[in-house]
Amino acid sequence: MRNLDVCRNIYSRARSSNASVSLVAPRNALHFTFAAAKVSRDPAEVWSWSWWGNESHSPEDFDWMVDYLDFIYSDDHESAYDILLLLGSVGVCCRPAKQHLFIERLIACMDSNMPLHLRHAALRAAHSAREQIASMDAIDDSTLRDMILTKLSLAILSVLCPHPGTTPANDDPNLFFNYGRDLCYLRLVFALARNSDWHPHLFGDRHIDRCISMIPRYCNSRYYEHSFFVAGILLQITPEQTSVTSLDSVTEQQWWDVTRSAWWYPSHIDNTRYLKLLLVLVDGTKKYMQFASKSDLEQLIRDVDNFVE
């Protein structure tokens, strides 16, 4: 990606000059890169799933972004937003030596004292790095593993929660439910739930409670993608967590709502990582279909037929 190479070179020259005013140049270069790629910087569009082609990038290509983020995140929120938006758009693939710094700055940018659009961009960057975060058992650095499981897990959930004592207006993006933000979050937690090492932390940090709270909102025909990931999260962890009290709040009818609505999405699946979930979804459907109405069963047959075809 030519423009990213230009940004990296401009940033390297700016840092070597030791003049803080020169950081205007890399900031402008980033803005040009967004404009050339037709990627909006508008915070209202932070959840749009636009990707910049299928080019592959080496971890070294992103090291400078992590360094840049580290250098400016505390006092230049707009540039930090640009870097996180960039990482969330092209993917995160840092070298092991930079992973610790990246996670630290991600947590810092999710802090409740940060601007909301910066916190949202940080959540999207975490979503982009979800496979690395989910595979924390493969990380040799024990300090980094502990930070991911303790601080990052809580920081991720905090982005979804309105500030204490506030009453959001109807058009406030900090609403308890937000379509794009919640889908980003569910995709991230779904990836984490595929690793059983994450399960105690998903319960302990109340991610599962958050997912359960989404059932009435999203497990219906209007939000089939959300439904699929809610089902994927809950069905992947319940077999080994039967004693967890938070799941006691889910009624049998809600379990049926979760499983039946999840079938509206599989026809869109083209990723092998979801195949294991389909097996779990089949078992869950058989278990809870006794609570289905006749019309629900007829719709289920149509949905399964669409998937098989």
Image (spheres, rainbow, N blue to C red):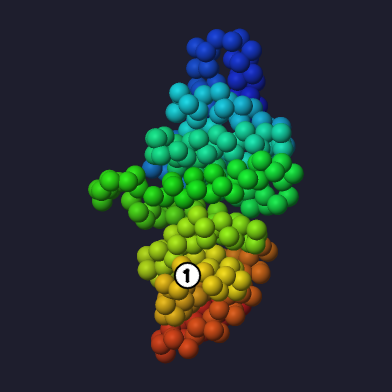
Q: Can residue 85 be seen in this view?
A: no
Where does residue 49 sit, x and y in percent of width and height?
A: 51, 49
Where does residue 155 sit, x and y in percent of width and height?
A: 49, 45
Q: Is residue 69 left or right of residue 164?
A: right
Q: In which quarter of the image is the N terminus?
A: top right
Total residue callouts: 1
Amino acid on which the number 1 mark rests in the picture: Thr
Q: Which of 201 and 31 is in front in this view?
A: 201
Q: Nearer the viewer, residue 196 or 83?
A: 196
In the displayed structure, would residue 28 be above or below residue 238? above
Q: In which quarter of the image is the C terminus?
A: bottom right
Q: Which of 207 and 262 is in front in this view?
A: 207
Where does residue 41 sit, x and y in percent of width and height?
A: 44, 35
Where does residue 215 sit, x and y in percent of width and height?
A: 41, 68
In the displayed structure, would residue 6 be above or below residue 285? above
The residue at the point 32 percent across, 46 percent down is: 164
Kindly identify which residue carries mark 1.
Answer: 245
Task: Tell me which corner region of the image, top left, top right, bottom left or bottom right, holds residue 176.
Answer: bottom left
Task: Tell me which corner region of the image, top left, top right, bottom left or bottom right, holds residue 273.
Answer: bottom right
The residue at the point 74 percent across, 44 percent down is: 140
The residue at the point 63 percent across, 24 percent down is: 8
